[in-house]
Structures are given as structure tokens and as C-alpha cells.
Image (tube, helix red, strand yellow):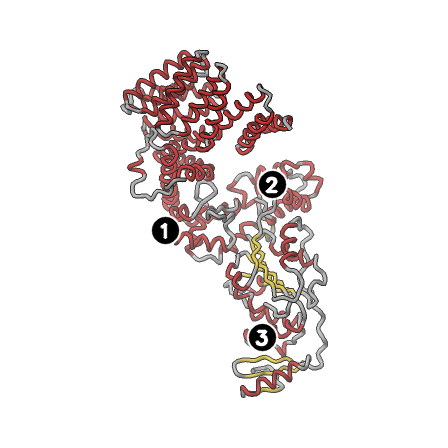
Amino acid sequence: MKDVPSVRSCNHRSCNHQSRNHVEGSAAEIIVQAGGDVVLYDQRGAAEPPTPHEVPGCTPLFVNRDGELLDLGEWLVPGSGPTRIIVVSGLKGIGTSSVVRRWVELQPGRYPGGEIYVDFAALRGPSGACDVSEGLAQCLRTAFGVTKDFLPATLAERTNLYRTHAARSGPLLVVLDDVTQPAQIRPFIPAAPGSAVLVTSSRRLDELVGDGARLMPLRPLDAASGVLLLAKVCGEDRVAAEREAAERLVELCGGLPIALTIAGTRLARRRRLGLAALADELAQEDGRLAALTGGERSVSAAVSLTCSDLPAEALRLYRRLALLPGRGFDAETAAALNGCSVATAEALLEELDDASLLEDAVGDFRYTLHDLVRLHARSLAEQDEPEEERQAAVRRVIDLHVVRVAFADRAIMGKRLRITDHDVVLAGHEDPFTGPGARDAALTWLEAERADLLAAVRVAHARGLDQQAWQLAESLTALYFHHRHPADWIESGTLGADSAARLGARDAEARLRSLVSRPLMDVGDADRAREQIEKAVELVAESTHPVLRASVPEFAGRYWDHVDRARALGWYELSLQRNIEADEPRGAALARLFMGSTLLASGEHERAVATLQEAYGQLDGLGDVRMAGRALAALGHAYDSLGREAEAVRALERAVDMLNATQAVYYEAQVCEELADMARRRADRAAERRHVARVLEIHEAGGSPRAGELRKRLDCLG
């Protein structure tokens, strides 16, 4: 072996066993086998190397991560078992190295063989290739005292020599920092029982699970920990003086330690810069990444380093993900965005997820991008993607949303009035909502996608995709009828109606303006509600759509119910007449339902009961469980007004079951509250408590401002 003095060499395989026994009996000699040769290195006379303690100290800015440190302690229990491997992964700048270093600091003497440290960033060349052989040489020199003259020349020989030394050292901790490939780790795994390997990486390195590794992906810091880190950098007094602004900074930095450190450093250097002023600066998305650059550190550079290892197709999808309306996406959405098959998109998403560029990969395979990663991806898209390609990518996603939401609308609402032509929109597409649970699945999906679908309406309207905008807005009312969300409904309906107007789609505009009058009344904006309903009445006067001509008067009646009940009854009668003429039994039943409620509010109890009974019978016969439940609830209220309490309770409790079964929780809460009030009248505290608890549950889930008031009422009931 060139330039390596050998004491003894033998080419005969029969000599291998004898030579190995001889060497292993002497702590002063080391044997390495290369091919068929056994080479013996004599190190007699060399001083015994000290126990290595090479892991650098943790930054003094380290905060929290108690859960992760506890997990590491539980996973790395000292003992005599096989070597344990832990991979701590995450986006660059999230603090993987800090977590590992802090854990090592808290474990003095845990590993009698010492702690070895290898920084793979220092071993990486300009091309990105990593010199693992040099890393092993470093360990042999610094941890085990092997001098330059006795270092083997090849990777295989150095691996064998490293393992021999590691096996003799006793339980050993090996920390491998900034690894990018599983193959880089395997040569460093010691065989000494009770040893451990701690790996940090911006990649998940899932392949190591086959080697028995445990994976620990790091998440960004929570709000409290982020504020604490900010205080450590810029001063506790400044954070205490502007606590709300500090929390906003943590949110704008997405809890990313590198971003918070840079922001805190800017504040420390510029004492006149207030936290609120910096938060205002970071709130401008176009300049946020530039603002999070300090000296040699920048968020953009950290993410760019990760992206430099991505294959071209994965990088292309990464850029385009920033163009998505909203935050969440799945493989089908990514496929539409990228113009590729779902299978290809799944593979590319796995690549991005492995690189820690995606967040929140959960059971239904939905992902999000960290806000700062999204801004980085958007900057690359604007730089590398032509505008026409970006526009085409967004349009494909919007078109996908139109189809998906239309399928959900159909599963939930059945054959209701629609201006969207489902025969055209859904032709050639596979229905994702089929089978007995289709309705509930569609409603659950819409609720989960609510924010992203509203963002799609916004983007479609802003980009002039007017037909898609109004079709999305119309289909989304299937969600809003059940779960309400008045602010979302108002925005979606208004944008959709404006897009329809811009397109000259008068029937669609009339439909959406009549629909949006409902949430406007819910939030008490009667003036805007009247504007919308009057415009809808004006538009429908020229319509030839018979069901639409019957529907708009119903919504007009709903508005006038709050202003002039006699006028409301006139609109309901017109709606009933037109529905009968159009042979639209559901519309006629709804007109009777609302007419009955108005009669009840006007004090015409007997007539109200008769009208509501007819409405309930028709809706129940049509299989419209949700609206039949609402009719039964109104009927129960009418019974109570007539002093028929037992009938009222039975009707209302049945209505609760029907509304709950159809996830119409907004109306379920109203009925439960009425039942609670009736229970209080008859001093039935147990029933009152049961109904108030359900009302509270619904309001808390929806973020209602009434939750506090309801909680107090429940507390008073014991």
C-alpha cells in the first residue's frame, strides 16, 4: 500500500485467522483487511488518545424544545443493546443542530467511549459531493489517535479501521451534522453495544428506517418559544414593552429560529427600530425575505441551499406550489398545477417532503408550505417561470376546484336550483363522493378546504376567470347553508356575483345576489342585504329560468321578514305560486316553510301550524332531511306558542336529531337553545344542562363570540 509502512503482510487466506488473533490480542496493533490481503499497522509507543468530547457547545440562544429533548432521552436509553440511530431533520435554520448539541450537553458521561463529531458541511465540495473518506480520517485522527502515516488510503479500509477502534472504545455517541444522504451515515455506525448515532439533516432520510433509525422531524417554534428567542437576541425589556408586536414578529417569521434570530439582531443593532415597525415591514410579503437577511445569514440562502440538491422536475413543482390559491394542497392539486399525472406529482411531493420543504403531511396526504418557504418559491417562480405558464398553471388548479366543489355540492344538496350546468362541468370527471356516506364526506371535505376554496374564488376573480369564480361561489353555498361562516359567504358570494356581472351572466348574478342577502342579514347589514336582493329582483324580471324566478322572491321574503312581515308574506305567496307553476315541489315546500314561520311571528298560530305541517310533510316526503328538520323545528316552536309543550318538545328533539344527522349545526344550536329555555321553564336542570352543553360545543367549535356567555350559563347549572 503506497506510502503506508506495513509491519507484516500476507497474501494467503489461510493466514488471515492467525494474523487477526495475533493483532486483536495486542492493543498496540491494528489490522485492516483489503481484498484478500491482511495489513497490520504497528502503533506501539503511541500515547493512549484521550476520550473524545468533540461535539460543539449549543448556542446560548437555544430555547425550549423540551418535548424533543425528552424524546431523545427516552429513545437513547443507555444499555448494552445494538447501536441506536436518531435522525433529527427539518428545514435549514430550524435548529436541528442546536437540539442535538443541547441534548449532548445535558448528558455528561452518558457514553463512556466519548462523543465524536463530524460536520458534513465542511466535507462538502463545490459540486455538493461529500468526502466521507475524509470524515472517517478525521475521526481516526482526532478521536482514536491514528497518525497520518497509519491512515489507510481507501474508504473501505478506513471504515474497517474506524469500526475496530469504535468497538474497543465502549459505548460511543457519534454526532453527524448536516448529512444529506443515508449512505454517508452507515460507515460511521459503531458496533460497540450501547452506542448511538445522532444525525442532523435538512432531509428526512426515511431510508434509514430500514436500519432501525428513529425519525424526529422538527417543527417551527411555538409562539411562546419564539418570543423567548426574540427576547434573548434583542433584549427582554424591549419585548416586554411591545409584547403584541413581538408575537406578530414570531408569526411573520413562521417560528423559524434563523428568521427570528436575524430579526432580533436587526433590533439589537438599531435600538431606535421598534418591534411594531419591524413587524409592519415584514408584513409586506414582497420584501420579507430581503428584510430577513443579516450579514452572512439569510433565510433565502438557507432555503436555496436545500433547493440546490433537488432534481429539476421537483424544483419546477416547488416553484409552482407558491402560485397556489390558499395554503393546503394534495397530490391531485399539485398534478393540475404542474400539468402532470397524479402518480408523478406524488413522487415529486415525496422528494420535496424528504427535503423538509413541505409541512403538515398528514393522514389524507395534504401538505402546506411554510410561509417563508412559499415566498422563496414564489421568487423563483417569478424569476424562472414565464407569465403565460404561471397563468396556465393557476387556471388548471382553479378548474380542478370548480369540478371538485361542484361534485361536493351535488352530493350535499341533490337536485336543488343551480345556474351551473353540472352536465357540462362534471362531464368526463370521476366523482370522488359516492356511496352511503357521500354527503357527509363531501361536507367534511368542504369544511376542511374552506379557506383554500375561498382563496380560489379570490384568485379567479382577480385574474379574470369570471365563469370559474361565480361557479365556485355558487357551489360553495352548499357548505355555507350548513355551517354558515357568514364572513366567508359574503365575500365569496359578492366576488362571484361581481364576476357574473362582468361576464354578463345575469341569471348567475341574480342567484348569487339573492343568496348573499342571507349572511348579510345574519351579520346585521340590512342595507347591503336590501341592495343585493333588490338587484336580484331586477335581474330576474328578465329571466326565462322558471325556478330562479320562483327562488328570488323567496329570498326577498326572507329580507322583508325583518322589516315588514305583511310584505314578506306577499313575496312568499309569489314564490309559492311560481314554484307550483314550475312544477318545483321543493321550492313550494320551502315557500310554505318560511310563510309558516312568518305567520307564527305575526301571531297567526293556528294558520302557522297548518302551513308548517304541510311544509314538513312535503320536505320529509322529498327526503330533504335538513330542511324537513328546520320545518319540524318551526312546527315545534308553533306548538309551544299554543301551549302544546309535550308536542313541542317531541318535535324539537326530533328536529335536533335530523339537523345533527345532516351537519346543519347552525340550526341545531338554535333548536337546542330553545329546548334549554323550555327545560328551564319547567325547572328540569338536567335537560337544560344537556342542551346548553351541546349549544356551547357548537359555538366553541365555530369560534362564536357567544361561547363565553354560554360557558357561564353551563357553569351556573353545575
Distance (Cα) linking label 1 and label 3: 46 Å
Looking at the image, residue 336 lies above or below residue 453? below
Looking at the image, residue 289 lies above or below residue 567? below
Distance (Cα) linking label 2 and label 1: 38 Å
- Taking the spot 58% from the left edge, 63% from the top edge, the residue there is 120
* Amino acid type of the residue that numbered disc 2 sits on in the rendered structure: Leu
The reply to whether residue 713 is in sight is yes
Classify mark 1: residues with Cα within 10 Å, few (<14), some (14-19) or many (20+): few
The mark nearer the N terminus, 2 or 1, is 2
Q: Is residue 704 left or right of residue 72?
A: left
Of marks 2 and 1, the one in the foreground = 1
Q: Nearer the viewer, residue 25 or 337?
A: 25
State the image coordinates of residue 267 (x, y, percent, origin top left).
65, 43
Residue hosting label 2: 249
Residue 340 disc label: 1
Residue hosting label 3: 160
